[in-house]
Structures are given as structure tokens and as C-alpha cells.
């Protein structure tokens, strides 16, 4: 086998989909240790991963849950430079903060490691050396940017400039955060070093590349043929797009001082690129956890490997890392990569640079004891198939109207009534006392474990949570319909049946809610005076025996008042205002010159808005009625995020009157309102003077 073929034909073990695995290896994306964890991370990766793992443990499955901090890469070194400290100090601080936040929030890792550990350096170095010795890399010498003042090569994030696509300043050498375009440093206009601010020069350097193009046939067979039906459409679609466009070699090394040193002679100042070493962190963490038995979780084809990630990590976990594993030859390939979409916050994209986020460690301080409320809301609103939006009002409503009013209310009423009528003991009943409606309720109760399990086995966590709440709704309705508080005086035997069945439902909730709401499950077990039970127990009809003594009732959930939510909204409003003040103007370059005749074709007029309303099922559109002096017309404008309908009525505006009509959501729009955009993205009217006459042309 020559070096062009090396690694491609290795017999990489693959778990056979459809078979029953002996064990599971579950990983969650390694959070970058240059900042805290926010709700977008939780909704995209860590809450669904934890639900899945807790469910598997409840079924008695052999599973390990691997997590850790990604502690290499340029953003960490840049942060260290800005704070006049060392990269190690940065990662030490944030690794501790992230790990502590996860523990308090109930993310149940078997190990939470870090990529700055000695174990990881040894594992990543050995992995690279194995592929190097097999001839799996290609070496290329190229010209790369070099900072002559700092005497170092500049990795992608050490270079900024003007984006060639949207012309925004401050784009990085790998991506423009304004328009989202992927870039290379050579594409930047007027590049500058982020370290010294100087203009870099080109200098020759050598790097090692993983030739992804050699693995296209393998990826087509493994992903496009093998996982067409079981991977989420967003994951499969992104992989297909990458493969169809044709894969290119990717550099696996960088000229940096921070990272895993390149394990080759005469390569001082070179490290493994972070996208190469970070996923190996899953393996090194497993070695740390199980030094004697780690291989069976990574190399046995009866092990099921599942990666939980956000959509921005799909290419790394579905194409690049699998190609690395395929090249090595002895590691498992992932059976599934259930990536979520993004979660927005109050209608705006979460942004760490703008501090537009809800940080986990701050939530835990502001809402002590309410971990499960956030877990519930993030799961109920999970961005499984499309981007979703977190709002504090929805958070409050789901707590008050669902967790408190349905789940908590049912359990509390059942336990309180049992103490009131039967001294806190589960009433004993005989089967002959059951009505057909009672039997149907019990049959329905016993169907929920399989329903929820099917959802979780197929990574439909939002659906599984809804089924759990349907069980709580079943109990709430059954108790309300039978009204034991009215029946007790005339038929106490009937009340025994009603409360027995209600308590059985509560006991089933204690078992089935644990993957989703672990703190609630623990509290409910304490109230019911039971030990934690495995999932299979919920398949039984009777979990509580007659005569079993309950503990006193406790509230599972508390009402969240308006002032608590307003405090959070005020905090976000202050952040938005600060961003607005600190935003720097982004001056677009002048467009190509047009002739006076071309300008003369535009009919610009003063108009007045006489009516306005929101366009149904949209966030951005307002339907405006305009008096143009020559007619009354409808214009649809994308300003609803910045102006309420009542705020725009009576305004004089500048109107492009002869713009060709266009359909918006079934409404024909005749013209365009002129707006200017502020540095923070908000829009402002371009308004004529107060004494401007409606209908007059703007020349």
C-alpha cells in the first residue's frame, strides 16, 4: 500500500445499526475554556446528552458519559494577551467555572476532563504519530502571514481585516462574524496582526495536512448510503453538501506556542491544530476514567458511539474526526451525531462578544433550586429541527402553567389528600373495586414508559418530555374528574381507589421524569418515601403497596412572579443599551457610480403613514398604509422588531414610490420606506423635515 492509499482501506469497526449494543460511549462537545457556558450550549448539546445518558442508566445499560474542556486554540491565547496573563491561567479559571456549573446543574458526566492534561497530550501525540508513520498526511510548504514585530506566524484568528463579501471591518482570518462567511487569511482586505496591529508579511512555513479528498468514497458509503434514514436531516444535509462540493486537504498543524507540541523532530513552535486534537480529547478522557478498560468503549464493534454537538460542529464530528478514526483503523465510527440547531435569546442571536446570553453560573445564582425549570424549558423548546427562541416570558409561563399547574399541582393534591383521609398511607384496594374507567387509566399509565423510551431512543427529546407531561395531565384529569374531596363523606371506599391510582401515577412520574428533571425526581421520591427505581419498574402497574407510608407533602415547583422576570428583562435591556453605546460604525464602501439619468428614474416622495399593523405569523414585517399625496397605498416594511404599529402612525417618511410591486406573505407591497442602519443593527427612519409637504418629490 502506498502513501496515497494509506489509512483509507483500514477495517474500521462499525457498530451495526439495529443490533442491541453491549455498551454505549456518549460524548458531548467540549466547551471552549475561554468563557462560561450559556443557555445556547445547554439547549444544543448538554441537556439532550444528559437526558439520553440518564435514560440509558435507568435502563441498566453500560454507558459512559464523556465531557471536558477544549483548552487549546487561538481565541484562548488572544484572551490571555488582552488580559495580560497566560493561556494556562485563562483555561484554569474557565475550566473550573464550567465544571462547577455543570455539576450544580446536574449534567451527570462520568468524567469531565481537559485537553491541557498530560494524558491528553500523550494520547493526541500518539494518534498523530500513528497516522504520520502510516503516511496518512501530506506535507506542504506555503507562504503564510508573519508578524515581523512579534517574530511569529499568525494563525487565522491572529489576523483581522475587511471582509471581502460584506466589507465589514474586524473579520477574522477564518470567518466574518458579521455575515458568517468562511474565509482564509489571503481573502482579507487590508489584513492586520491582532497582536501588534502591524501589517503582516508573507513568509514560508511547512505544515501537515489530512487529505480528506482521499476519503470521499468512504464517506459517501458510510454517511450518504448508511445513514440517510437515521441521522437528522440537518446533519445528513450538511454532510452531503460538504461531500458533494468536494473535500480538500485540511491542515492539522499550526505555528503556535500554545497547544499539543508536534511530536516530530525539528518542529519547535508548531502544535497540533485544535480541531485535530480536541476530538481526541474524548479518547484521552476515557483513558483517564478507565485506564484498563477504555478500549472496549472505543474499539469494540458492539459498542454504540454517539456524539452530541451543536450544528456548528457537524463537519468536525461527521467528516474530519471520522476520517481520522478511519485512517487509524482500529477505532469505532459514530453511530449517530444528533446535532441541534441554534437557540436565540429574546429574538436575537446569542453572542458572547456582545454579552447577549444567559450564563449558566449566573442563572444558578439568580434561581437557586430551579435547575429543573431551565432543563424543562430548554427541552420543551429544544431547537431540534430549526432555530428556536428563548424568552423570559415563556420561561415563566412554562413554569407557572405547566410544571406548577399540572405536574406539581397533581402530586401535591394527591399527597395532601392521602394524609388528610388515610393518615398518609397508600390505601389498599382490591381489583374488584376498579371501574372500567379506572382500568383504562391504569392501562394508559403503563403505556407511557414505552412511548417515552421510543422518543429517547430516537433522540426526540422534546417529544419525550411532552409524553411525560401527558402522564402528569392524565393524573391531573383523573383526580379532578373523580373529585375525591366531594366523594369521601358518602363513599370512602371509592376515594381509596382514586387516591391509590393517583399515587401510582405519581410514582410512575418519579421514575420517568428522572432523565429530564433529576432534582424533581429526587424530591418526589422523598415525598413518596421510595428509593430511586429503574425504568423497567415503571412498566408495572403497582409501584406503591397498600399501607406504604408517605412523607409530608412538599411543593415540587414554585410560582415565578412578574418582578423576578422583569429583573432579568431589565438586565438584558441594560446589555442591549451598552452594546448600542459601544457599537462602532461600520462604514460600507461606496457603491459603483450611477448616471444622473439612472438616479432620475427613482421616484422619491414624502409620504405619511396613516395606519399600521403587524403581519400575521412574522416577527419583522409591518403592513403600512401610506398617503403619498397622489394615492393611498400599502407598503410592507421589515421594521416590526424596532417599531410598534402605534409608534409609526402619523410619521412622515421618505418613500421610493416607483419600486416594482412585490408580494410579502400574500400582501402586495407598492414601494419602499427608506431606513438607515445603526452600528448595533437597529433601524431608523430617514425622515423629511416637519414642514415637508406630503406628496412632494425628493430631488
Image: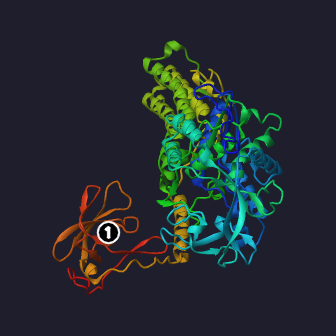
Which residue does the image show at 29% across and 55% down from the upper left? 665
Q: Residue furthest bottom?
A: 691
As rendered, which of 420 and 433 lies closer to the eye? 433
Q: Quick check: 266 above or below 443?
A: below
As rendered, which of 570 and 500 lies closer to the eye? 570
| Residue 510, image x, y percentages | 61, 33
> Dividing the image into 4 quarters, which one contains the C terminus?
bottom left
Which residue does the image show at 66% across and 38% down from the upper left? 522
Q: Quick check: 125 above or below 676?
A: above
Question: Which residue is labeled 1 in the image?
Answer: 646
As rendered, which of 95 and 229 lies closer to the eye? 229
Q: Residues within 10 Å of mark 1 (few under 14, many from 20)?
A: few
| Residue 364, image x, y percentages | 65, 54
| Residue 591, image x, y percentages | 40, 77
Tally of marks: 1
State whether residue 458 appears in this view. Answer: yes
Q: Residue furthest left?
A: 630
Q: In this view, does 386 lie to the left or right of 649?
A: right
Q: Is residue 188 left or right of residue 486?
A: right
State whether residue 372 appears in this view. Answer: no
Q: Quick check: 660 above or below 586?
A: above
| Residue 426, image x, y percentages | 60, 24
Q: Which residue lies furthest to the front in this view?
A: 2
| Disc 1, SS | helix
Coloring applied to the structure: rainbow
Which residue does the image show at 72% across and 34% down from the upper left? 299
Amino acid at each position: 500500500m502506498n502513501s496515497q492509499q494509506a489509512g483509507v482501506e483500514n477495517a474500521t469497526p462499525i457498530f451495526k445499526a439495529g443490533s442491541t449494543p453491549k455498551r454505549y460511549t456518549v460524548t458531548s462537545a467540549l466547551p471552549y475554556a475561554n468563557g462560561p457556558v450559556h443557555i445556547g450550549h445547554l439547549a444544543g448539546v448538554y441537556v439532550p446528552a444528559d437526558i439520553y445518558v440518564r435514560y440509558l442508566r435507568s435502563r441498566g445499560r453500560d454507558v459512559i458519559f464523556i465531557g471536558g474542556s477544549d483548552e487549546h486554540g487561538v481565541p484562548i491565547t488572544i484572551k490571555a494577551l488582552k488580559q495580560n496573563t497566560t493561556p494556562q491561567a485563562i483555561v484554569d479559571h474557565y475550566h473550573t467555572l464550567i465544571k462547577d456549573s455543570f455539576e450544580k446543574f446536574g449534567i451527570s458526566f462520568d468524567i469531565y476532563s481537559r485537553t491541557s492534561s498530560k494524558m491528553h497530550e500523550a494520547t493526541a501525540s500518539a494518534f498523530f504519530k500513528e497516522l504520520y508513520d502510516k503516511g496518512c498526511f501530506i506535507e506542504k510548504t506555503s507562504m503564510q502571514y508573519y508578524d515581523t514585530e512579534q517574530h511569529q506566524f499568525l494563525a487565522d484568528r491572529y489576523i483581522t481585516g475587511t471582509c471581502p463579501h460584506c466589507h465589514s471591518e474586524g473579520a477574522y482570518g477564518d470567518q466574518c462574524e458579521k455575515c458568517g462567511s468562511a474565509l482564509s487569511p489571503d481573502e482579507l482586505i487590508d489584513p492586520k496582526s491582532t497582536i501588534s496591529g502591524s501589517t503582516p508579511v508573507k513568509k514560508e512555513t511547512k505544515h501537515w495536512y489530512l487529505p480528506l479528498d482521499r476519503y470521499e468514497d468512504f464517506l459517501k458509503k458510510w454517511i450518504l448510503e448508511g445513514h440517510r434514514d437515521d441521522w437528522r436531516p440537518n446533519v445528513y444535509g450538511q454532510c452531503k453538501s460538504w461531500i458533494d462540493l468536494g473535500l480538500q486537504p485540511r491542515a492539522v498543524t499550526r505555528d503556535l506556542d500554545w497547544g499539543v507540541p508536534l511530536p516530530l523532530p525539528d518542529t519547535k513552535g508548531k502544535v497540533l491544530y485544535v480541531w485535530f486534537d480536541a476530538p481526541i480529547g474524548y479518547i484521552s478522557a476515557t483513558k483517564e476514567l478507565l485506564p484498563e478498560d477504555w478500549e472496549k468503549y472505543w474499539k469494540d464493534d458492539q459498542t454504540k458511539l454517539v456524539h452530541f454537538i451543536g450544528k456548528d460542529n457537524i463537519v468536525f464530528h461527521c467528516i474530519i474526526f471520522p476520517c481520522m478514526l478511519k485512517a487509524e483503523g482500529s477505532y469505532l465510527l459514530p453511530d449517530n451525531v444528533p446535532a441541534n440547531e441554534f437557540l436565540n435569546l429574546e429574538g436575537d442571536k446569542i453572542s458572547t462578544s456582545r454579552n447577549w446570553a444567559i450564563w449558566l453560573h449566573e442563572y444558578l445564582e439568580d434561581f437557586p433550586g430551579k435547575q429543573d425549570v431551565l432543563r424543562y424549558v430548554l427541552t420543551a423548546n429544544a431547537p431540534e429541527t430549526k432555530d428556536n427562541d428563548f424568552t423570559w416570558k415563556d420561561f415563566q409561563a412554562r413554569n407557572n402553567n405547566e410544571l406548577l399547574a399540572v405536574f406539581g399541582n397533581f402530586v401535591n393534591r394527591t399527597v395532601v389528600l392521602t394524609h388528610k383521609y388515610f393518615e398518609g398511607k397508600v390505601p389498599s384496594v382490591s381489583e374488584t373495586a376498579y371501574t372500567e374507567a379506572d382500568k383504562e387509566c391504569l392501562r394508559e399509565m403503563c403505556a407511557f414508559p414505552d412511548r417515552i423510551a421510543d422518543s429517547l431512543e430516537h433522540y426526540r427529546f422534546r417529544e419525550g418530555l411532552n409524553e411525560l407531561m401527558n402522564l402528569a395531565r392524565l393524573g391531573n384529569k383523573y383526580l379532578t374528574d373523580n373529585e375525591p374531596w366531594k366523594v369521601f363523606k358518602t363513599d370512602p371506599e371509592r376515594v381509596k381507589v382514586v387516591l391509590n391510582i393517583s399515587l401510582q401515577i405519581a410514582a410512575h412520574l418519579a421514575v420517568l421524569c428522572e432523565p429530564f428533571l433529576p432534582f424533581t425526581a429526587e424530591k418526589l421520591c422523598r415525598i413518596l418515601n421510595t428509593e430511586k427505581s429503574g425504568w423497567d419498574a415503571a412498566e408495572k402497574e403497582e409501584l406503591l403497596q397498600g399501607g406504604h407510608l408517605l412523607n409530608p407533602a412538599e411543593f415540587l415547583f414554585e410560582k415565578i412572579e412578574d418582578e423576578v422576570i422583569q429583573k432579568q428583562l431589565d438586565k438584558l435591556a441594560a446589555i442591549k443599551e451598552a452594546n448600542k453605546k459601544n457599537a462602532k460604525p461600520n462604514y460600507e464602501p461606496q457603491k459603483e457610480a450611477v448616471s444622473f439619468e439612472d438616479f432620475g428614474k427613482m421616484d422619491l416622495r414624502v409620504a405619511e403613514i396613516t395606519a399600521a399593523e403587524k403581519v400575521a405569523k412574522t416577527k419583522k414585517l409591518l403592513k403600512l398604509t401610506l398617503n403619498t399625496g397622489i394615492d393611498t397605498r400599502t407598503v410592507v416594511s421589515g421594521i416590526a422588531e424596532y417599531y410598534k404599529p402605534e409608534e409609526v402612525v402619523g410619521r412622515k417618511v421618505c418613500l421610493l414610490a416607483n419600486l416594482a410591486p412585490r408580494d410579502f406573505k400574500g400582501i402586495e407591497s407598492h414601494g419602499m420606506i427608506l431606513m438607515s442602519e445603526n452600528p448595533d443593527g437597529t433601524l431608523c427612519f430617514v425622515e423629511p423635515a416637519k414642514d415637508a409637504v406630503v406628496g412632494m418629490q425628493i430631488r
